[in-house]
Structure formats: structure tokens, C-alpha cells
Image (cartoon, rainbow, N blue to C red):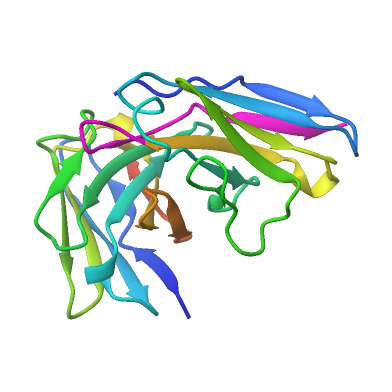
């Protein structure tokens, strides 16, 4: 049950786009189109932002989008806003009927 | 209103036991898999356990297998995590989360803090 691999940090200026990668294996990311993404500002519970690779729950701004290719999924934030500053985590079910999270990425708005 | 509220956290000595709870409202536990996810101070999220929507199966992270047990009471709309043989590395905020069909976690509680220390 190794964690999915994410970059520790990414940054961008307001209005720019940033992309966070999430690399797994054929036993998790590569087996299902079920990667989800969570936003977690400091001191708060995680919030679902993307599910099924590229679907957004009601209320999530459309500047958040997801994609996947092989064993790697990506989250893109287009038109970065100050309120987007937070930690972001990817997650995937695995072929062992367990789940795995990425190590997390801190997004900083410059 | 759909929500989850955790309780029962606290300070426990290494080797001790603790049971934490998650109260669900606004939905039926028989329609959703329920999970526990933890976060050590300053660290990332770690998946801990799942109980299936029909209660027939449970799965655990390797780090807690054999020590933790997830269960539920559908009539009381409660989910539990019994934690035995606790270690310092189990110190974390423990979140309860609801699974949707996609395998994602759409509702999270605010968490309950468990500290393992002598």
C-alpha cells in the first residue's frame, strides 16, 4: 500500500494555471477511472473537488479540472484564485479493495 | 442535513485501547460504504479502513490490520473504530468519510484527535 506520488508544492500567481500530478501503479490509478481530488485548507477537513477523474461535485468552480493518462492523474486549477491556496490530495481505490492517498501538494498563490 | 460527527478521541497510553465513533445524519448507512481516514500532525492523509454499504466486508490498511476493527450500528446510524494495541505512530486526527458510488469521499466529519503517549 504505497502512497501515490505527488509533488510537495506548486505555486502560481493569481490568474495563472497550475497542474498537480498524481502517479500510481497498475494496481490503483491505472486500474480504475476513479481518481478523486481533495482540497484541505489548514485546520479544516478535506473537501471533495473532483471524482471519477474529471467530474465536479455541485458547487465546485469549473476552474478545477482533472485528467488521467495511464498510471498518472492530474488536477489543473485554471485562473488561480487566492482562496485556492491549500493542500491538495489525490486518492484511488486499489485492486485489493483498499484505498490509497497521495502524499499531498501545497498550492501557494504568489 | 447530511453530516458526520466524530467523537471519542483522547489521550491513551501505548498498548492501550480506544473506540471512536461517527454519528451519521441525513442518509442511510446501508446506501454507502463508510471509511476512516487519519492525518498525523503536519502529515498527509492516510486511509485506514472501510465497511461496505451492506456490512458484509471490511478492509484495512496494512498499518492497522489486526489491531483496528471497523463496525457499524445501522439503527443508530453510527460507525465505530475500535483501536487496540495503540502505538505512538497512531497519533492522528481521525476522520469519518462517506463513500459515493465513484469510490470518492463526498462527506467528511470534522475529525476526532487521538493521541498515544505515556
- Say which residue appears at 54% left-offset and 50% top-offset: A46
* Relative side of A97 to A46, left or right: left
Whether residue A23 appears in magenta in the rendering, the answer is no
The residue range painted magenta reads A93-110
Q: Residue at x 47, y 29 (%)?
A: A102
As drawn, A59 above or below A38:
below
Residue B118 visible in the displayed image? no
Say which of B41 and B3 sits in front: B3
- Asked which quadrant contains residue A61, the reply is bottom right
Query: Quadrant of residue A3 in the image?
Result: top left
Q: Is residue B90 visible?
A: yes
Which residue corresponds to the image point at 24% horizontal and 34% vertical from the top-left?
B61
Q: Position of residue A73 (x, y in %)?
A: 53, 28
Q: Is residue B74 left or right of residue A64?
A: left
From the viewer's side, name the closer residue of A87 and A52.
Answer: A52
Q: How far from the left and from the top, in percent, is residue B108?
A: 45, 59
Q: Position of residue B46 (x, y in %)?
A: 38, 36
User: In the image, is B54 to the left or to the right of A17?
Assistant: left
Instruction: Give x and y (percent) for residue B78.
Output: 24, 70
Q: Nearer the viewer, residue A106 or A80?
A: A80
In this view, B82 is above or below A103: below
**In the rendered image, the vertical position of residue B40 relative to residue B24, given as above or below:** above
Q: Is residue B49 left or right of residue B25?
A: left
**Residue at left 35%, top 56%?**
B101
Q: Quadrant of the C terminus of chain B?
A: top left
Q: Nearer the viewer, residue A51 or A108?
A: A51
Q: Quick check: B59 above or below B21?
A: above
Q: Is residue A97 magenta?
A: yes
Residue B19 occupies quadrant: bottom left
Amino acid at each position: 500500500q504505497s502512497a501515490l506520488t505527488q509533488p510537495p508544492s506548486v505555486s502560481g500567481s493569481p490568474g495563472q494555471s497550475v497542474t498537480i500530478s498524481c502517479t500510481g501503479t497498475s494496481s490503483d490509478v491505472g486500474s480504475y477511472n476513479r481518481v478523486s481530488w481533495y482540497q484541505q485548507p489548514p485546520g479544516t477537513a478535506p473537501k471533495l473537488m473532483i471524482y471519477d477523474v474529471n467530474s465536479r461535485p455541485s458547487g465546485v468552480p469549473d476552474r478545477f479540472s482533472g485528467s488521467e493518462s495511464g498510471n498518472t492523474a492530474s488536477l489543473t486549477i485554471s485562473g488561480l484564485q487566492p482562496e485556492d491556496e491549500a493542500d491538495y490530495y489525490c486518492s484511488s481505490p486499489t485492486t485489493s479493495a483498499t484505498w490509497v492517498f497521495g502524499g499531498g501538494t501545497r498550492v501557494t498563490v504568489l | 442535513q447530511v453530516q458526520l460527527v466524530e467523537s471519542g478521541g483522547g489521550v491513551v497510553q501505548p498498548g492501550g485501547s480506544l473506540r471512536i465513533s461517527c454519528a451519521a445524519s441525513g442518509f442511510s448507512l446501508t446506501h454507502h460504504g463508510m471509511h476512516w481516514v487519519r492525518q498525523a500532525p503536519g502529515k498527509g492523509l492516510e486511509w485506514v479502513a472501510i465497511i461496505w454499504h451492506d456490512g458484509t466486508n471490511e478492509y484495512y490498511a496494512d498499518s492497522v490490520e489486526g489491531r483496528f476493527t471497523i463496525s457499524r450500528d445501522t439503527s443508530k446510524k453510527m460507525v465505530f473504530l475500535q483501536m487496540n494495541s495503540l502505538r505512538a505512530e497512531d497519533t492522528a486526527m481521525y476522520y469519518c468519510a462517506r463513500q459515493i458510488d465513484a469510490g470518492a469521499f463526498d462527506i467528511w466529519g470534522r475529525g476526532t484527535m487521538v493521541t498515544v503517549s505515556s
